[in-house]
Amino acid sequence: MNLTLKVWRQKSGSSRGQFVEYQAKDVIPDMSFLEMLDVVNEGLISGGEDPIVFDSDCREGICGMCSLVINGIAHGGHRGTATCQLHMRHFNDGDTITIEPWRAKAFPIIKDLVVDRSAFDRIIQAGGFVSVSTGGAPDGNAIPIPKEAQELSMDAAACIGCGACVAACKNASAMLFVAAKVSHLGLLPQGKVEKDRRVLRMVAAMDHEGFGGCTVTGSCEAVCPKEISLDFIGLMNREYLGASLKGS
């Protein structure tokens, strides 16, 4: 099938960007979206043009690098699917596809479709650690953990930090990301020792980075490739309130 791509091109964060139209010809339906872009780039390079710059790494929906807004929706709008898992069979011959980077003040554009997501790293550094020495792998029965707590923690740990939640939110809020990280570190026994200090520091870091406030529209959960639940935001808010009252 043949497609028309309207791709955001921007040489640097300080330069003006614009949409540039490209033709993607003879696209195989079983290609992933990134493989389609690879083929388009091969054509651009052979023609002496600069290739479209975009992020990718594992291409298995694990690393969170594939940060594209496709037709106005982060990751393309298929539930539980990262951009690298999106296949061209979801599009039709003759379609026009608009491709943009994440749009958020806290995610400045580096070039074309690549943004700087190091704000997430700094939030993790602010409190996303466990200082308790856990040693080697303990016996599975050494620390009793309720099954519900274990499963909830693992659900939160599924977050890959891609930033789709920020890109989809009208306020560019990072609450779903921060809530997932706070929860997966704080729900298990090893992380409870400093959970109050952690939530205060990570929320403060989030605010410092310039992310917006959460108004619970649910757009973040809708585009999350790991389907992280809004319930984690409620859990983090309760932990934050409790830690604030304790004066941690």
Image (cartoon, rainbow, N blue to C red):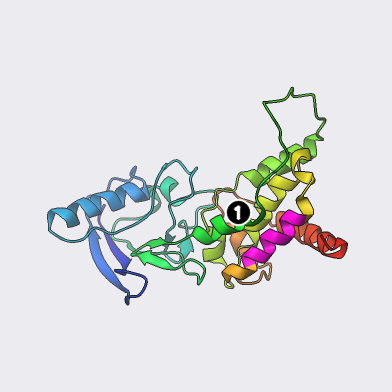
Residue 204 picture quarter: bottom right
x, y percentage for residue 157?
Answer: 64, 44
Provide residue 153's location: percent of width, then percent of height. 71, 43
| Residue 202, magenta (yes or no) | yes
Residue on which the image places disc 1: 125
Q: Quadrant of residue 53?
A: bottom left
Q: What segment carries the magenta color?
A: 197-206
Q: Is residue 85 above or below residue 103?
A: above
At label 1, the amino acid type is: Gln
Residue 237 visible from this viewpoint: yes
Q: Is residue 44 left or right of residue 4?
A: left
Identity of the residue drawn at 21% across and 61% down: 50
Which residue lies most toward the left here? 47
Q: Quadrant of the C terminus?
A: bottom right
What secondary structure prevails in the magenta region? helix
170 on left or right of 88? right
Magenta stretch contains residue 32: no
Spot the residue most to the bottom: 16
129 and 21: which one is in front?
129
Q: Residue at x 27, y 49 (%)?
A: 38
Percent of width and height locating residue 14: 35, 75
Q: Nearer the viewer, residue 242 or 94?
A: 242
Q: Quadrant of residue 20?
A: bottom left
Kindly tell me whether residue 172 is visible in this rendering.
no
Residue at 65 percent across and 71 percent down: it is 213
In the rendered view, tell whether residue 11 sits above or below residue 131: below
Q: Is residue 205 left or right of residue 12?
A: right
Please name whichever residue, 69 or 65, is drawn nearer the observer in this view of the structure.
65
Q: Residues within 10 Å of mark 1 (few under 14, many from 20)?
A: few
Above or below residue 157? Residue 24 is below
